[in-house]
Each structure stands twice: as structure tokens, then as C-alpha cells.
Amino acid sequence: MSTAHTVVSPQEWLEARKALLVKEKELTRLSDEIAKERRALPWEEVTKSYVFDGPNGKETFQDLFKDKSQLIIYHFMFGPDAEAGCPSCSFYGDHHNGTDAHLEQRDTTWVAVSRAPYEKLAKYKERMGWTWKWVSADGNGFPEDMKVSFNPPFDGTEVYNYGTPKFIFPEMHGLSVFFKDKETGKIYHTYSAYARGADILLGTHNELDFTPKGRDDEEFAPYKMAWLKRHDEYEAKGDAD
């Protein structure tokens, strides 16, 4: 990006900034309206019984809620044969560290789910320094039912992100939300988002969007996150203090 840019007087800068603020407020109001419509979506009951492997051994789907009525699940790309988690999903994982305490104040728990054996998940989680809960769904059918895991050979009919994409991999990422009726014990699937539908979770991207260079990723198109590495794989740069 060239450093050449329009430079104006303070008054002209203020006028341009206030003009953009009008659009920013429109976007905020639209985002609020979409969130309201998201909460109003109909639910579907979860009737299957899923058992996961986690830090407490075997855990049922109900166990993942703890004593809360809402559960957010991040579908983390880490297949049974992989030796490390997906770099992009690891980027999401970095952003969730430290937020559990806040979510639980709003009657919500958060759990990551992958198909890799729990031993692999625990080892990688320790390497990354994450504190959130991660469980294995290896063999229980949950990732397949949620349309984020696929078993080859692929025939072009696989459904991901509510359509049939041109490219599919055995593991894909996404976010799903569930509600548990504490009186009846019934669980309902209320929402799922995939691909860029979960982009709002990436605070780093949102912060970069404030800067003149933005995400600075056009050279990596069509896969604009190709620059990304796991946080312990970057060459050390910047302040040494």
C-alpha cells in the first residue's frame, strides 16, 4: 500500500468522518435487527444421544451445558489423523481464551468439538496455552450431523453452509448454538453459522478493519487467510521488552 493518501484540513477531516459515521450507525442498527431475527428463528429438537470424550472422561451432550441453559459449540477442524489443529481454527481458539467467565454470567457455556481423539486435543491445547473446554466427538456422529465433517469419497452432494460448495474437506469449521429446557431436559438446536458466518468472532480482523491497510490480505486471494500461522510459529518481531 502506498503511503500517498488524501490529506485535508482538520475541518474537512471531521466532515468526512461524520459522513462515514452515519453509515456506521446504520450498520450497527442493521446488526441489532439481524441479531433480533436470529433469536426469533424456530428451533429443532435434538433427539439423538451423543457421548463425547473430554477432560472428565465420557460426557453426554447434556453434560456440556453444565448448569446453564445455553451452549455454544465451535466446530474446530482437527481430524482423527491430524497431528495439529487447523491454523485458522487455532486463530479462533486464540480469540476465545478468557471469555468463559463472561459467557457463564449470561447463562451460557462454550465448548470446542473435534473428531480427533481427546489425547491429541489435550496435547495441542496445552501447546497453545488455551483454557477453554475441548471434547472429542470421534465416532459419535455429531460433527457429521451438524454438517461440518464428511467422509470420503465425496460425490458433490455434500451440504455445507446451507449449500453444495465447489470444494469440500473432511473437516470444516462452524458454530452451533443449543438451548436446554431445564424443566424437561429437552435440547434444541437454535442456530448454526459456517465459513465467514463466524467471522465476527475474530477480533483481530475487526481491529484491522479500523486501520488504513485493513486486513492487508488481497495478495493471498482466493484464500485470504493463507498468511495465518499458529501463534507459536511466527518469527519473533517487534519489541523485545
Image (cartoon, rainbow, N blue to C red):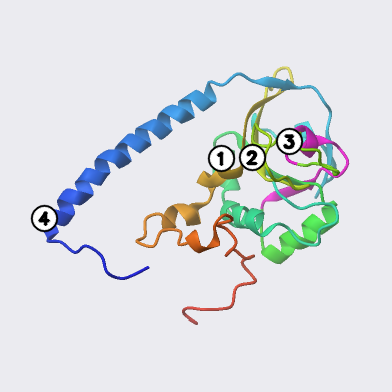
Q: Where's residue 131, x and y in %?
A: 66, 55
Provide the residue designation for mark 2: 175
Query: Considering only order in the chain, which callout, 3 or 2, is on the residue closer to the N terminus?
Result: 3
Whether the residues at callouts 2 and 4 have beta carbons within 8 Å, the answer is no
Give the camera-side residue of 133 and 171.
Answer: 171
Q: Is residue 62 left or right of residue 17?
A: right
Foreground mark, 1 or 2, reads 1
The residue carrying mark 1 is 197
Q: Earlier in the sequence, mark 3 or mark 4?
A: 4
- How many marks on residues? 4
> What span is colored magenta in the figure?
132-148
Q: Secondary structure at mark 1?
A: helix
Q: Quadrant of the N terminus?
A: bottom left
Q: Is residue 84 left or right of residue 138?
A: left
User: Pointer 1: residues within 10 angstroms few (<14), some, or many (20+)?
Assistant: few
**Mark 2 residue crowding within 10 angstroms, few (<14) / some (14–19) / many (20+):** many
Q: Which residue is mark 4?
A: 11
CA separation, marks 2 and 3?
11 Å
Q: Which residue is labeled 3 in the image?
A: 147
